[in-house]
Amino acid sequence: MIFMHDIPVVFENEEIFLINKPAGISVQGGEGIAHPLDEEFSKQVGFKIHLVHRLDKETAGLMLVAKNGKAASKWIDLISSKQVRKEYDAICFGLPLLKGKESESGVISGSVTKKSGAFAREQSALTNFRVEKVKKILLPEESAGKLLTLSRIHLKLGTGRMHQIRIHLASVKSPICGDDKHGDFKLNKLAKKRIGIKKLLLCSSKITLPLSSQESKTFSIDLPEYFSFFDEIPD
């Protein structure tokens, strides 16, 4: 169980909080959702906060919330106009395949489906990626000595569609470790058994905010502790 007190505040001004959302917390309430972030963080600060964007429940990291409705409208517009720049880190299986070749950097394009009730529509999406490090793990026994390749990938969003990063990485055969919706079920099961991966390894790790017409500021955080196993794998 995750307790919803003391959500870390990374930055604050008269309009916004920049928080570090733990994995496992739903951003907004709904049927069957207990202790959503919008309710619990409002309790923490003593007044109603307003959402301006979202992170998936299992995604950790930097997220903006507004202090009032006027500020929320402003920051929603800033995000929509791409003046807020969001960056992520993920640990994935394999290396991205672009045009059939393993690639260390590039742009993943391809539409994602947005569903609303019984309706669905395709939305264009762009994700820039850079592979920062690759590790290989020898899996014994039932895997017959198979090498499992893991890669740490840094990502910058060209668009901000729901589940965009997860869908795009899966589409280039490099699904995020622990992704039980868009990822590789067999590899997730193997990684959980052999490496102990139990969470989605995706983090909103850096964000650049236009704090005024003259100043933008970049904020970054350390990756969550459950990412640390990757650096412990021998090169």
Image (cartoon, rainbow, N blue to C red):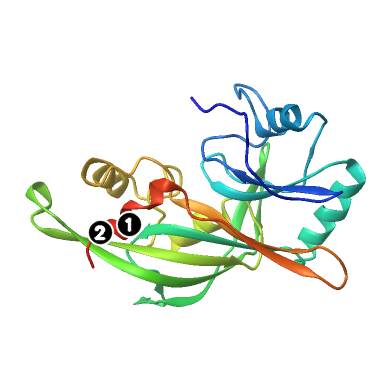
Residue placed furthest toward the right: 70
Q: Position of residue 183 (x, y in %)?
A: 40, 50
Residue at position x 84%, y 58% from top? 77
Q: Which residue is mark 2?
A: 233
- Separation (CA) of disc 2 from disc 1: 6 Å
Q: Which residue is mark 1?
A: 230
Q: Nearer the viewer, residue 78 or 43?
A: 43
Q: Nearer the viewer, residue 51 or 223?
A: 223
Q: Residues within 10 Å of mark 2 (few under 14, many from 20)?
A: few
Q: Position of residue 10 (x, y in %)?
A: 66, 50
Q: Which picture quadrant has residue 44?
A: top right
Instruction: Indicate the amino acid at tag 2.
Output: Ile
Name the secondary structure under disc 2: loop
Q: Left or right? Give the position of 61 relative to 29.
A: left
Name the secondary structure under disc 1: helix
Q: Nearer the viewer, residue 51 or 217?
A: 217
Q: Left or right? Give the position of 47 relative to 6.
A: right
Q: Which picture quadrant has residue 56?
A: top right
Q: Quarter of the image for the C terminus: give it.
A: bottom left
Instruction: Indicate the amino acid at tag 1.
Output: Phe
Q: Left or right? Give the position of 44 relative to 171.
A: right
Q: Which picture quadrant has residue 233?
A: bottom left
Q: Is residue 26 above or below residue 94?
A: above
Q: Position of residue 81 (x, y in %)?
A: 80, 65
Q: Is residue 221 above or below residue 43?
A: below
Q: Position of residue 163 (x, y in %)?
A: 57, 51
- Mark 1 and mark 2 in contact (Cβ < 8 Å)? yes
Residue at position x 83%, y 30% from top? 47
Q: Residues within 10 Å of mark 1 (few under 14, many from 20)?
A: some
